[in-house]
Structures are given as structure tokens and as C-alpha cells.
Amino acid sequence: MEEERRWRKQFQDTINSLNENQRRSVLSKAKTLQILAGPGSGKTRVLTCRAAHFVLNEKIKPQQIIVVTFTNKAANEMKKRLYTMIGSKNTNNLVIGTFHAICARLVRFNAGVVDLKSNFTIADTDVSHDIIKSLQKDRSLPISDFTRHKQKPGAIFGIISKAKSEGITAPEYSKLNSHKFERKDIATIYTAYEEQLKLNNLIDFDNLLIKACELFRKKKNVLAHIKGVLVDEYQDTNIVQYELIKLITKNQDTDKTVTIVGDPDQSIFSFRSAEPKNFNKMHTDYSDTQTINMEQNYRSTGTVLDSALHVIKQDIKRIDKSLYTNNPVGIPISLISTHNEDEQATFVAKEIKKVIKYSKGLLDYKDFAVLMRMNYISQKFEATFRKYRIPFTIIGGDRFFNRIEIKDILAYLKFAYNNFDYLSYSRIVNVPKRGIGDVTLTKIGAFHEAQPGNSMLETLRAIGNGGGTFSNPIRQKLKSLAMICNDIKAMIDQKMPIHEILEFITDAIKYKEHLKEKYFADHEARWNNIGELISLAKAETYLGEDDEPVMSQTQTKKSQAQQDQTTKDLDDLQMIDAEVVSEDDSDGEGKYFNVSELSFGEHVADAGCMLDKVEKDAGKVFPDDQDFPESPGDDKTTHKIAAHDEDLPEFDILDESIPDFTSYFSDKEIDLTNITEEKEKESFHFTQKEYDQTEGSDNVKKEKQEENFSSQFPNYQHEMDPIIEFLEYCSLSANQKEQDEAEGGRVTVSTMHASKGLEWPCVFVVTCCEGVVPMHHDPDVSEEGRLLYVAMTRSQFFLYCVTPKERTVWGQMQTSERSRFFKGMDSKLYTTHSPEWTNETRSMLAVTIGKPAPPDDDNLVTTRKKSGSKKTADYSTQYTDYQSQGFYSQSQTSQPSFPSSPVKNESKPFYNGFVSASTIPDVKPSTRPTKRRSQQDKGQKKKRTTAFASQPKGKAEPSVKPEPVDKLE
């Protein structure tokens, strides 16, 4: 009992550290709760605390709580925080993960209910494209020549995926579009595509959700034991995901509490069928819905927030809410105009170096981000950053698990596990090259179709043993392939470690020699990627813990060295230009492009990858929100948590009637409430826990009671075959390894979409032109405004919005205008030149990013001529209310919130849902009023201001001269 009280008191201290609205959100008794959380308002912490509140105070068993995130990394961050609140055992018993990960486990656990085999594998986007490409070549399909030869597989798949996201099945799509000329071919391919998935025992990302919906409709006690459902990033949910939430909470046998956290102002993924209307739908479908606004921002300065609010308040359809902060007011944002795109890139490069110099150690390369609307804009920055020796990484290019070499090795593992996976067979049959041509492959396919019910591996064995009319060399090659796959399958059946299986595959097929022969220019980098994959499998961090592959020891040391390097050392950094083949393996030949390579074993993004290829990824997993820099995940913290975890009590719960749950493995039904030891060993869905307590003690009896109670719940977290766990991780991981590289000491170059949930002290939003932001062809200008709002609120302190006056478009020089979203901005919020540096600027920067302020240095102070300068916003050295973030114990007293006043728009001109910015009144300061300063404080501030004015002029850093703009009309 004493330990229980200690843990509860510790959690109560955490609750007391929250601000008023955060605390209301955590402790709310609402059955259906919407938490509308603005950027940087602490939504991750609130969602984590609410889950802990359910366990500690509401006494809900962890197995009875589902927490849905949009990335594995977000789930991992929540777990780290929950370890300190409820202990590792209770945390690991939570059902926590992405929609796709949770649905994959539920569907696999009940595969027979939805007409699937339990050993299905997940088809990633590339596999889906390959299926559609093969269907386009199938002459038996009645489709037009245009669809067959002109339509791109990715475009066709995008239409199919969008239909699935809206809950439209293939038969329904055919019925709706059979008489529409422009859609009837898509309907034909959609139907054939679904048949191919079933034939190959595959399930794509969209079908994971659709099959889960089917499961919940057919079997209403699957999640009857669940009492609480929490959903993160609700604004990114689509129609099917909302339907899933409804089915989980309304269509199962027991009532459940529902908590969603999201921000309609950050709804920017309509191309993935995200549905902002889901906020209003919840009020309609759940009549008892309560809403709490979290408006206090802990990330950015007041000026950054006010400038971002100027943009977002132009959306006349938005749910009215505001943002405020107790951070320093900060400095004006910089609205910069350059002559052209080359000067824009040069300005950014020089400004990065200048800011690092003048920050006196507060900032390093990892603290900068360059954000853009489309990925192709990055080309100029890549070349310029190499020229100025600035280390950088691109977020939005080829992902680690999309690399050719990674997909080759995983295809062997997939095929050995799922012998019906024809797509994986098609990939490995000539890797390495076996000289099996298209004619022979067609004969193999025909021989396989003539033996219905046989797996592809059985077909290969039959051919190797004399079946069919094949030449002896072909028989020997296929027999050799079948023997390798048999050996891999035997290793899987013997439960051998996955990293040993991967090592066997690479040795058996002599993959290193294959890479050297086919990709000589970068074969070593590719081989090192295989090493990373094996390291990942060996470390076993994929078990729901991480979203990125673990870096090797060499990489970790080098990344740390980069982070610790001083600015002077970085100036002498030797850049290496490496030739790396792009990942277009459609014809087996790659295109070469230059990249910057700084550390051992890294894969580099194909910078030429267009945004639509990245953004239409069917993985539908989005960047997570990292509202808080603190992360109790280091070794010491973890060790400490583990040491005390034994002391955390198992919180008692009243006995209740729990319905029987059944699990379908293949076509056999297994009753988990009375599972035998023999079945337990046979089924990879069930894992026995071992205890070392002595027999007969009270502790043993209590543990057995807990075990009996827990056994009534299907253990979705741990009842997974290691191979399935690993393959699902590889398929569902969407965050890119480049993000870790950026954190290790590089400037981040990213699309606006990919930046969501991230933050940097200094952000450059580039090419802020009409026709880019907003896009010319985008009918929904309101979403373009939300996208710019998201980009601007990534900044903690410095924010530059840069516009080149001339741009090259399709080889033609065109003039550009600054984006309409900046028009009418209060002149106090922006300046048209680089920020001015004073000792007070450095002090405010240090407070905002939570670092100690460096000593004053009058040699690193810039001043400008009065005639050419614009009056800047008043500075403030007030300190942040960091208590609610756990940073500092001393904080200001929280001030009562003011009601946000909606923008009146009767008679104001608007365009496609956006009101003209010039008609909006000046934005009020974001910082809420504090107690009136004493006369002594006023005197000190006046004295300090006078001191700044009398400081000698510092030598200005040479830079590209931005074009002055005195007024935004």
C-alpha cells in the first residue's frame, strides 16, 4: 500500500504541474471528449497523462485501454513517458500503436472471420504498384489502350486507395462507375487487384483497416473488454478510420470512453483522404461530446505565433480558437525577397552560418530547417549547401525500407514465410541474376496455374524434380532457389534468430557479389545498408519500440561527433561527393546523381523524388508531434525505471463478467479463456509469462490471480511470431532514417507536409510565392493556408519566409509575387531584412529553447542604419511558464484565459473559403498580460534599453542583399 501511495503521489505531482486546460483534459469525466490542441500546446503529454489517469485513478486495466497514434515513433515516445507513471509492465500491457499496426494484429488474430489466412503478409506501396503494372500487361483484362499504356500504375493505385479510404469496396466501385468512361477501367483493375491480393495471400494498407471494420461488424465481442479508447492526431483520420472508432466504441458489447486529440487548423492531408469534418461528425454521432481547447503554446515566441495566426485566421470556416504563450515576445519574423532562386539558396546558406556564429554556441546545424511546398525546390539548396560545406539531410526522399537491397533480402524472407506470395517470388527469381527470361517466367506461371492449390514453392520443387517441359539448366537453377527457400523456411520453423536468417540469405545467394556486379558505383553503401538491417533484427528494437533502424556503433559515434563539433571545426569539414544510384528499379537500371555523404553506412535520399510520390504513399502514417524536448529514454533513466518497476502495484479492479474471446488461426477457432499448454506452444499468438516466486506464498497466489484475469484478454502486444513482428515493422515503418541523421547534426531540408509535428529554433520557409503557396491548381485554398500555418509554427524563435522575385518554371523565367497570405500583416510582426542581433536577442533565444544564456558579447551585435530599417516589435525578457512542461520549477502564475474573438467576415471579400488578409484587424499580442511591473523593474528595463542603443556597431556579416519591401499591401 505504501508503494501504491508513492506512485499515486508521484502522478499527482505530474497532474499539478499541468496548466489549467491540460489538467481539465486529463481528469475530465466526459464519456466522449474532444481536446483541440494547438501546435506546441502539449497534446502528447496530456494524452499520456490521461492514459495513466485511467490506470491509476479510474482503475482500468491496461489491457482494457487502446491508444492510437499515427507513427510508431509517437507510440514509443508515449511508452517512455508512461514507464515513469505506471511502470513498464503496465505500459507494455496497453494496446498502443498506429491504426494499421493495431488492425494488423487484430485481423491476424481473427483471420478466419474475414476470410484470410493468418500468415498473410503486408503489401507495401511498391508491391501494389507492381501488381497494377502486371494487370496493365494482362491482355485478358478488358481495358482501353490508354489505360494499358499511358496511365501510370501509381496514379491508378492512388484512385483505388482513395476509394478504399472512403470505404468504397471493389464491387461498390464497379457499380458506381461501370457506365463512366473515365472510371470503368479503374473499376476493372480494382476488382482484378483485389483478386491478386487474395491469390497471393497479401493485404495492403487500406485493406488492413477495411478488414478490421468487417471483423468488428461480424464479431461484436472482439474488443468487448476495452473500456477506454484514445486517439492522437484526430485531424488526420479519414472516413474509414472514423468508422473504425465508431465500430470499436459503439458496435462492441460494452460502453467505452472516447478521447480524441487533434487540431483542425493542422488538417493538411486531404490528398490522403483526411476528413476535417470528422470533428463535427463526432458531435453528431456522440451527443454527449465535450470539447476543451488547449491554447497555451510552449514552443514559439509571441511574434511567431501572431504572424502564424494572421495566416490561419483568414480561413473563415475554421473552428474559432486562439494561441497564446508565456515565452518571450521575440523578434519580428523576416519576410525576405531575393532576385531569383539561386540568390534565395545563397541567402539561406549564409544566414545559417551567420546565425550559428552570432548565437555563441546556442545553435548548431541540427537546429535549422528549410521547408518548402514541393520537393523539387530542394535542388538549388542541395548544390548551395555543398558549396558552403553545410551538412544537410533531405526528409521526403527514398526511405530505408524502400531501398532496392533491403527489399531484395526481405523478399526472400517473405517468400519463405508465405509460400503463396507470388510477388516476392517474382522479385527474387532473378536476384541474383539466374538467366531466367520472360518466356521461361511465363511458362513457370502457366505451370503453376495448372496446379491449383499448390504454393509457389511447391511449384518450384516440382519443376526441379522433373515437372513440366523445362531445360535441365533451368531445372537446376529453380531447384537451387527452392533449396535456399526450404532452408530459410526450416530456420523460421526452428525459431532461429532473425538476424541469423538474414545473414544466411545474404551468404546463400552471394548478395555482396551481386551488388558489386550490378551497382559497382555505390555497392559498399548498399552492402552497409544490409548491415543496418541485420543490426536492426539483432537489436530487436522493432518490437513496437522504434520507428527507425538502429544506427550502427560506427554511425552513432560519428553522429555524436558531428553534434559535438564546434563551428570552427565544421568550417574545415571535408565534403564527399558520392555517386549513388536512384531507386527506380522498374527497368533494373538506375540514374546517377550527386549527394552529400558524411558518415559510414548511410543511405541517401533521392532528392529528385517528387512530392506526390512521397505524399501518396499508401502507408498513411504521418509525422508525430514532439511537443516536449524531454525524453526519459536514456539508459540511466530506463535502468532506474526498471529497478523500481517491481514496486509498482498491480492495481485491483472489481470482478466482472468478461465475455469469452476466440482467436481464429487459419480456419481453426481457439478459445483463449481455456487454452491448453500444448495449444499455447503450437500457436505463435500466445506467449507464456514466467514467474520465479516460490510456490505457496501469498505473492504467488496474487500473481496467479492476476494471470488468470489477464488471460481473459487477447494479448495483442506480445502474441506475435517474431517473423511476423519483424515483417510488419518493416512494412508499417514510414518515418525515415534521415530524420535521425538530422538530429545528429545536419540541417533538415523537408517538405511542409513532412515537417508536421517537428520543431526547430530556426526555420526558413522558402519560395513563398503565389502559385506555390497556394498552388495554382489547388481548389481548396483554405488547406494551403493551414499548410503555411503548420510550417510557420515549426519555428521556436527565428522565422524567415523567403520569396524569389523570379523563378524558372518549365525552362521559362517567370516573375513571382509574395504569397497572398502575408498581405495586410501588422508591420510590428515582420521586418524585411535579416534579424538584428543584440545580447538581449541571445538571452531570449536561450530562454525559448531552454538553454543557459551565453555571456554578453558586444562584438557579436549588429546595428542597422535608421533610414533603411523598420521599427521592430518590443522585446521582452520575461521567462517562460515552463513548469507545466517539466523544465523549470519556477514559473509565472498562470493567467486566466481570454475568450478568443472570431474574425467577423460579413461583407469581407474572400476567395475559395479564405477571406482577404488585408481586411483582418491587427492581431493582438499573443502573450497574456502579466502583473504590472514595479517602478524598479521599469527603471532597469529603461537602463538596459539605453545600454543597447549606445553599443558600438559590429561588423556586419556579408550576405546576399534581400530586396526591401516597406509595406505589405
Image (cartoon, helix red, strand yellow):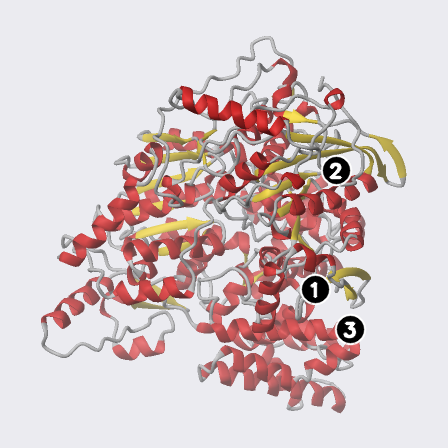
Identify the residue under disc 3: 519
Identify the residue under disc 2: 956
Residue 564 placement (x, y as % from top left):
59, 60
State whether residue 915 is above or below residue 223.
above
Please identify, in this view, whether the residue under mark 1 or under mark 2 is nearer the observer.
2
Please identify, in this view, whether the residue under mark 2 or under mark 3 is nearer the observer.
2
Is the Cβ of the residue at disc 3 closer than 8 Å to that at disc 1?
no
Residue 278 placement (x, y as % from top left):
46, 34
State whether residue 913 is above or below residue 567.
above
User: Quarter of the image holding residue 865?
Assistant: top right
State whether residue 587 is above or below residue 925.
below
Residue 295 placement (x, y as % from top left):
43, 30
> What type is the residue that disc 2 sits on?
Ala
In this view of the protein, can residue 418 be seen by the observer? Answer: no
Q: Indicate left or right for 12 with 271 as reference.
A: left
Packing grade of label 3 (10 A; few <14, some 14-19, many >=20) is some
Packing grade of label 1 (10 A; few <14, some 14-19, many >=20) is many
Residue 598's tag is 1
> What type is the residue that disc 3 sits on?
Tyr
